[in-house]
Image (cartoon, rainbow, N blue to C red):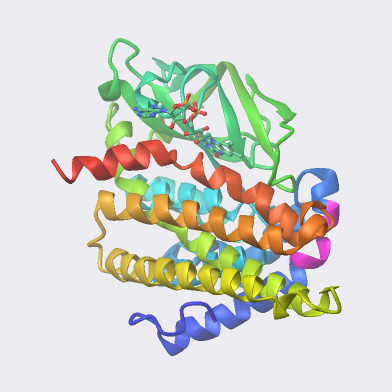
Amino acid sequence: MIFKDAPWMTEELSILGDATRKFFQAELVPHVERYHAEKQVDRALWEKAGEYGILAASIPEEFGGAGGDLGHESVIFAELGYTGDMSFGLFVHNIAIHYVLAYGTEEQKQRWLPKLASGELIAGIAMTEPGTGSDLQAVRTTAVLDGEDYVINGSKIFISNGQIGNFFILVVKTDASQGAKGISLLGVETDGLEGFRRGKNLDKVGMTGQDTSELFFDDMRVPAANLLGDIEGQGFGQLMNQLAWERLMLAIVGVGVSHKAIEETVTYVRERKAFGKSIIEFQNSRYKLAECKAKLELLQAYVEKCIGKIIRNELTADEASIAKLTGSEIQGEIIDQCVQLHGGYGYMREYLVARMYADARVQRIYGGTSEIMKELISRSLI
Ligand SMILES: Cc1cc2nc3c(=O)[nH]c(=O)nc-3n(C[C@H](O)[C@H](O)[C@H](O)COP(=O)(O)OP(=O)(O)OC[C@H]3O[C@@H](n4cnc5c(N)ncnc54)[C@H](O)[C@@H]3O)c2cc1C
């Protein structure tokens, strides 16, 4: 149990953590090799996770969820990290759920949340475009009102769950003459949707079991009733308000992954021998692992503090950015060291630590790059 000493930990959360670990061990871990070969997970994994309540931890019970809060989700994401495998695109599904929860009309919540909870809808969040990533207000996908529908033209890139997903929170310009003020969010169900097209499953350095795609929209018609919130032009503010949880979530996953990396490495250096003794008997190996543990303990203490604050709705943008920045940087440092202690085997994808190494690199890029995190943190200083 990863956050067992956290001040916000309860018996209920502890039971959830244990059950989630068992779920992932039974339903995810045995299949990861196939997921990596097929470059995406099975839809059945989503449905099982839905039955288990993992997709809907913080969806209120009236909408088919488990009625928990971000403490429940934090425990689940730490356990997902602890699998050491990033094939299951639960992060973006969860992010999309929070948009519907926070900004959806009553009708939209009734329509979408039960299906997002069961896995009938698998969600993604489509912000990034070929021409813009960090600078979100420069998106060029347009949504023009025509009768009862928006007509959407444009494209998105690097969209997680882009192959398997059938519901996307789409970032569009409802007023192309404006920057941030012209941005709106639409919920888009894609099954049978004319004008919607997926590009190929992109060939990534890591996270190879998770699908990432381009999406294309050619005169794609979406009901105007799918606008999140009732008023156009609120999308940028809506995005900014959700970023604290998205960024903290990535740090939480980083904590889980780092625990797994250290454990795997301790096991390996106990067994592997050189110069007539186990690798762990070299003082350097023990000191390097001690450094990893010390860094992880410090990171975890900060992340636990942030989780406590977000449960109380007190987490600030700069605190979330610090968690994302340090979480992704420390995760990278720890896994790099773990690869080193595995020697050549640490560079072979057959070994979990090698896959973790490739997966960890993107943590510093998506969800806001490390540079953007520093920019945001610096604003709290001046
Ligand atoms: C595996 C993967 C999954 C992803 N999943 C999704 C998804 O589901 N949905 C989605 O919408 N997007 C997704 N993304 C996109 C991701 O969020 C963007 O790649 C990221 O935000 C960076 O944008 P960019 O690639 O356009 O880089 P750019 O914005 O072009 O940045 C290039 C470099 O310039 C730096 N830079 C930019 N602006 C500044 C500045 N103001 N100050 C200092 N440095 C700056 C950046 O830090 C970076 O180092 C995913 C990306 C990957 C790789």
Q: Quadrant of the N terminus?
A: bottom right
Residue 98 visible to the viewer: yes
Q: Is residue 245 above or below residue 206?
A: below
Q: Looking at the image, which residue sits at the far front?
A: 275
What residue is shown at x 70% (from left), y 58% (from top)? 339
Q: Position of residue 196 (x, y in %)?
A: 63, 24
Q: Is residue 187 left or right of residue 30?
A: left
Query: Going 68% across and 78% down the picture, which residue do you hit?
Result: 22
Q: Nearer the viewer, residue 204 or 59?
A: 204
Residue that appears at 46% across and 85% down: 12
Residue 337 magenta-highlighted: no
Quarter of the image that includes the C terminus: top left
Q: Is residue 250 visible?
A: no
Q: Residue furthest top?
A: 177
Q: How many marks?
A: 0
Toward the viewer: 118 or 148? Answer: 118
Q: Residue furthest bottom?
A: 11
Span colored in magenta: 28-34
Q: Quadrant of residue 333?
A: bottom right
- Horizontally, is 88 left or right of 256 in the view? right
The spot of residue 120 in percent (x, y) is: 64, 52
